[in-house]
Image: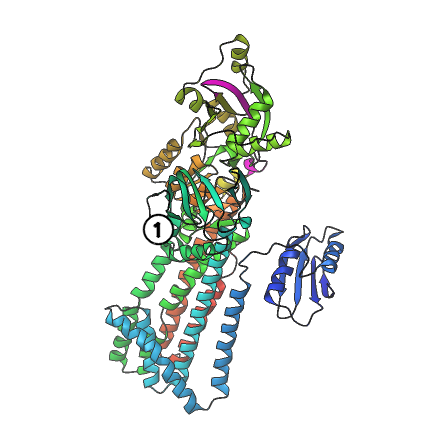
């Protein structure tokens, strides 16, 4: 692709593509192509000007040459680039055009159209606002539409068409900005959630299960879903039965039983059982729209602060109307009385607060933090206790197998092969480690087992050639299932000398221990610093909970500087701890990555899941962070704290500024038209200012 460098300075380059016009689809392809370059930190592509602004690492000497080389070889048709189905460009274009024509129309009416035509236009347009106010009164409510309708009506009755037109224009502009910001934030959030769908188990005609990308699944394919996994696509159940949590799509709080013939929805979670369903809709045929609908309709989207702002805005309307009547009764001066109508607190409160929260959610997404609702940012800001699951959360998301210790004369490669065969159906950090180790040793693990049953927080049960096969924790193997260690001196000595500095996964066949898989689970390098930083940003208690032995847990907790730790815990223990914290008057944030963390994630004021963890944890959690860096937790807390500070600041600024305008109007120092103009301009200013990044 031919292009020309228009401008260049340290770490920044602006280039223009040599073409007559650029479509939005082409702009998206170029954007994601350049964004994928390792040396590029940020890209902005304009399809209107055909320019691309590229920010890159100026310390990297090869960065500039790499970018130029990539541009020279780029082709819209042949270059490999993965573009999301929804990029947000079309949405932004729609609202850019709406705002442009709104401003253009106002300019034409003000400077081109004759006054009689302009007056007729304002009268016709005012009918909509007056109608909304009357409908509000008909419902017996004195809310913001009544105040807007009264302001416009009084201005028209006084013959002040210019003020009425200005008020309506600014109301339209404010509503458009609010709608744009809201839809952009929802769109950004939906894209993050939409892209969480990755792979699915497809049953072939030969009866084998194959793990494939969800994007490759076609209508008519048969997909198998097991306990704890997200249903990736819409379909009709062919066989099996299970309980499906549909809260994210239908709002139902209790799981729904599904069996043959039932319809299942993409994005819902199979809490228990196993289902095989026939795909009805491929990826993209409804899931994105359902996610958008879920976000917009869910009460999770509104924080308590937003609700208070909306309530306060409406509750101030009677005072504004009463102030207008009282001022006129005392002064007999219509201009002063109109100060209460032209200036009110409600518009700015109702507009700025939701925009502030949604912008904070969007900023979180820039830091790879997916927040499902404003109230969870508020909960993070108010929380004083933060609880960590250890495995896969405080430890690296990619643990590795150190060794496989066999018992009863079992073959080591065969035991690892069997473990991988069982574990691959239930992705978790430790399960992934077993599967990776089998791949590393070139051990192919064909499906030899019968139906697999996942026992939350314990392990997996199945049968191999008619022999009961179990894999999981010590508690599951020896206490729940009453398995035994082979009765030989060598096996007992080996069992008693198992390492205590790693996680142990026990494999039993026919009620006898067959192997122990030792998983190295190194602590994340940033974890110690993160615990210190969490204390610094206001958490009074940082707690670790794990199913590991007390000895292992104590060593990890001491190294990390935890305030407290709990070892050998079950899922119900984690949830019970959070309930006890609530009873003590504390607000709690919980971070986990596995199916066994789901009860605690639901119980917490804000549940945070690791993106690389189990699908059910991601779906149940209120917030998801990437698996790359725990420091995102500190960023999340800082954004939450800054959000609450900005909301408090907005309250003060809105009340002070508008109060001053009303006071000046009452004293006769400011005409009502000017007060109205300043009020509406300030409303838009507060709203636009609320869109700025918090950090």
Residue in view at x 38 percent, y 41 percent: 602
The residue that appears at 49% across and 13% down in the rendered structure is 486
Residue 354 x, y percent position in the rendering: 41, 60
Residue 482 visible to an observer of this rendering: yes
Residue furthest front as drawn: 206
Is 39 magenta? The answer is no
Vertical side of 482 occupied by 385: above or below = below
Where residue 375 sits: x, y (%)? 40, 51
Structural crowding at the residue carrying mark 1, measured as other residues with C-alpha within 10 Å and reported as few (<14), some (14–19) or many (≥20): few
- Quarter where residue 441 is shown: top right
Q: Is residue 501 visible?
A: no
In this view of the protein, which residue sits in the foreground, 15 or 358?
15
Left-right relation of 389 to 334:
right
Q: Position of residue 436 (x, y in %)?
A: 59, 33
The one nearer the camera, 112 or 658, is 112
Could you tell me residue 143's position as x and y percent? 30, 68
Q: Which residue is mark 1?
A: 251
Task: Classify 657 as above or below 236.
Answer: below
The quadrant holding residue 294 is bottom left
Find numbered disc 1 in the image and state the secondary structure of the residue it sits on.
loop
Q: Toward the viewer: 241 or 595?
A: 241
In reply to whether residue 512 is colored magenta, the answer given is yes
User: As displayed, is residue 625 above or below residue 418?
Assistant: below
Q: What is the magenta range?
A: 509-529
Residue found 36% across the figure and 42% down from its top? 259
Colouring scheme, one of rainbow, by chain, secondary structure, one colour? rainbow
Q: How many marks?
A: 1
**Looking at the figure, which quarter contains the N terminus?**
bottom right
């Amino acid at each position: 692709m031919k292009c020309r460098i228009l401008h260049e300075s340290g770490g920044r380059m602006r280039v223009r593509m040599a073409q007559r016009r650029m479509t939005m689809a082409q702009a998206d392809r170029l954007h994601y192509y350049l964004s994928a370059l390792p040396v590029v930190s940020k890209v902005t592509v304009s399809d209107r000007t055909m320019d691309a602004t590229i920010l890159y690492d100026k310390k990297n000497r090869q960065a500039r040459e790499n970018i130029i080389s990539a541009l020279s070889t780029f082709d819209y048709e042949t270059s490999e680039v993965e573009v999301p189905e929804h990029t947000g460009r079309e949405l932004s274009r729609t609202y850019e055009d709406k705002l442009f024509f709104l401003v253009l129309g106002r300019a034409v009416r003000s400077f081109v159209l004759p006054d009689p035509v302009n007056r007729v236009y304002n009268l016709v347009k005012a009918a909509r606002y007056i109608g909304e106010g009357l409908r509000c009164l008909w419902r017996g409510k004195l809310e913001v539409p009544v105040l807007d309708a009264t302001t416009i009506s009084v201005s028209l009755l006084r013959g002040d068409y210019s003020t009425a037109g200005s008020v309506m224009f600014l109301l339209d502009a404010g509503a458009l900005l609010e709608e744009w910001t809201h839809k952009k934030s929802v769109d950004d959030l939906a894209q993050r959630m939409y892209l969480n769908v990755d792979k699915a188990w497809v049953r072939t005609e030969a009866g084998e299960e194959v793990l494939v990308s969800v994007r490759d699944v076609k209508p008519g394919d048969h997909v198998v879903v097991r306990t704890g996994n997200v249903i990736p696509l819409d379909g009709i159940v062919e066989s099996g039965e299970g309980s499906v949590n549909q809260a994210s799509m239908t709002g139902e709080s209790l799981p729904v039983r599904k069996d043959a013939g039932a319809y299942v929805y993409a994005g819902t979670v199979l809490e228990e059982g196993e289902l095989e369903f026939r795909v009805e809709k491929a990826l993209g045929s409804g899931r994105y729209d359902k996610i958008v609908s879920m976000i917009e309709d869910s009460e999770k989207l509104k924080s308590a602060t937003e609700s208070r702002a909306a309530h306060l805005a409406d509750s101030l309307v009677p005072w504004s109307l009463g102030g207008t009547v009282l001022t006129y009764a005392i002064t007999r001066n219509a201009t002063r009385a109109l100060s209460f109508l032209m200036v009110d607190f409600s518009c700015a409160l109702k507009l700025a607060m939701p925009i502030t929260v949604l912008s904070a959610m969007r900023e979180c997404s820039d830091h790879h933090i997916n927040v499902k609702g404003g109230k969870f940012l508020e909960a993070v800001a108010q929380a004083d206790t933060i609880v960590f699951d250890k495995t896969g959360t405080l430890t690296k998301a990619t643990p590795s197998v150190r060794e496989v210790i066999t018992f009863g004369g079992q073959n080591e490669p065969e035991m690892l092969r069997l473990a991988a065969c069982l574990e691959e159906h239930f992705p978790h950090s430790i399960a992934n480690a077993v599967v990776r180790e089998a791949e590393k040793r070139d051990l192919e693990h064909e499906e030899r087992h019968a139906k697999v049953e996942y026992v939350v927080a314990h392990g997996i049960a199945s049968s191999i050639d008619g022999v009961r096969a179990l894999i999981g924790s010590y508690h599951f193997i020896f206490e729940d299932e009453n398995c035994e260690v082979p009765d030989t001196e060598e096996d007992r000595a080996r069992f008693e000398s198992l390492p205590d500095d790693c996680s142990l996964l026990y494999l039993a066949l026919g009620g006898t221990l067959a192997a122990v898989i030792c998983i190295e689970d190194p602590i994340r390098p940033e974890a110690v610093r993160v615990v210190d930083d969490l204390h610094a940003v206001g958490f009074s208690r940082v707690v670790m909970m794990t199913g590991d032995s007390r000895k292992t847990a104590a060593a990890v907790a001491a190294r990390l500087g935890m305030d407290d730790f709990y070892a050998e815990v079950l899922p119900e223990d984690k949830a019970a701890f959070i309930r006890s914290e609530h009873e003590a008057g504390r607000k709690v944030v919980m971070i986990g990555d596995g199916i066994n963390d789901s009860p605690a994630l639901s119980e917490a004021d804000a549940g945070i899941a690791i993106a690389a963890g189990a699908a059910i944890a991601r779906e149940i959690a209120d917030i998801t962070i990437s698996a790359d860096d725990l420091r995102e937790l500190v960023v999340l807390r800082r954004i939450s704290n800054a959000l609450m500070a900005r909301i408090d600041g907005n309250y003060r600024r809105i009340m002070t500024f508008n109060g001053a305008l009303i006071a000046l109007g009452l004293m006769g120092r400011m005409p009502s038209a000017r007060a109205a103009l300043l009020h509406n301009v300030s409303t838009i200013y507060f709203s636009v200012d609320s869109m700025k990044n918090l950090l």
